[in-house]
Each structure stands twice: as C-alpha cells, then as structure tokens.
Image: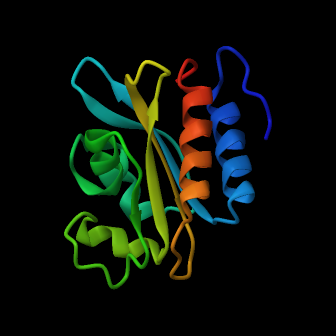
Amino acid sequence: MATLPESPTAADWHSFLLDVLASFQCVTGTLHRLDPADNQLKLVTCERIPDVLIPVIQVIPIGKGVAGAAAQRKEPVEICNLQTDTSGVAKPDAKKTQVQGSLAVPILTAAGELRGTLGIGKMEAYDFSDDEKARLMSIGQEISGRL
C-alpha cells in the first residue's frame, strides 16, 4: 500500500482509497473525516458511488447508516448483503450502490480517538473475515494522524 505524505491532497486520498480497494478486492469505497466542529462525518473521497448518492453521503451524522454506526460503535460494521439486509443499519438509498458485501470501520488513533471512517464494498454477498476487519482497522489507525 502506498505511503501517504504528511499533508495528503485530495488526489493522495483518492489514490490511497483505490489501493485499499485493490488490497481487499473491493470495487466501492468511502473515506470520511470527523469534523470536530459539528461532530459529523464529512466525505473526503469515494469510488464508484452513484452520483445521485454523493449529496447524501457528503455529511453523515454519527450513528446514521453503516459509516455512522461504525463511528458511533468504534468497531467494524459489516453487512453481508446490503441488497437484502433488514437490520435497519443501512439507509434505504444505500441499495442504489448495488453493493452487497459491505464493511465500514472507524478510523481511530492509538488512543482510541475517532478521526473518521473507511468503508469498502463488493458487488457480491460476502462475509469479511476477522482478519480482514482487523487489517482494515489497522490501515485506519495508520492514517489517523493525517486525517
């Protein structure tokens, strides 16, 4: 995985997200930064999210949707098949992504402070392993100081 510079640009963040997606054999992804001013998640970059959903994911309240739930719980939130999920965690518009296997993790500092969220998705139903969840959490912690 490529190393991020100390002050990443928008292009650096997008390149980072593409590297993460390739590493997990995923096709969709989002990266959100926690804005301490209003305690909401703000979109940094995304990949293969339908244009109609971009306004919806620009700002995510803590606790809302998969990313918001991961931020609130400070732990990975996985949905094996977003298209058939009835848990209520994912928002109804999320189905427009056509994603099935979905995983969002909080980006935490070593001290456990929330800095944002990182989400990845596959177009088929998929159960992410504990190792994959731990790996994505570790990637999040690695970038937490730059986010």
Task: Name the image quarter holding residue 130.
Answer: bottom right
For the view shown, which residue lies furthest in the top direction?
6
Q: Quadrant of the N terminus?
A: top right
For the view shown, which residue lies furthest in the front direction?
130
Disc tally is: 0
Where in the figure is residue 7, as x and y percent of width and height?
A: 65, 15
For the view shown, which residue lies furthest in the right direction?
2
From the viewer's perspective, is 135 left or right of 60?
right
Where in the figure is residue 12, as x and y percent of width and height?
A: 70, 32
Task: Name the image quarter holding residue 142.
Answer: top right
The residue under the point 72% across, 42% down is 15
* Nearer to me, 115 or 112: 112
Where in the figure is residue 146, as x and y percent of width and height?
A: 58, 20
From the viewer's perspective, is 116 left or right of 47?
left
Q: Where is 92 relative to 37, above or below? A: below
The residue under the point 43% across, 18% down is 111
Q: Where is 41 relative to 55, above or below? A: above
Task: Name the image quarter holding residue 36.
Answer: top left
Q: Where is 100 relative to 33, above or below? A: below
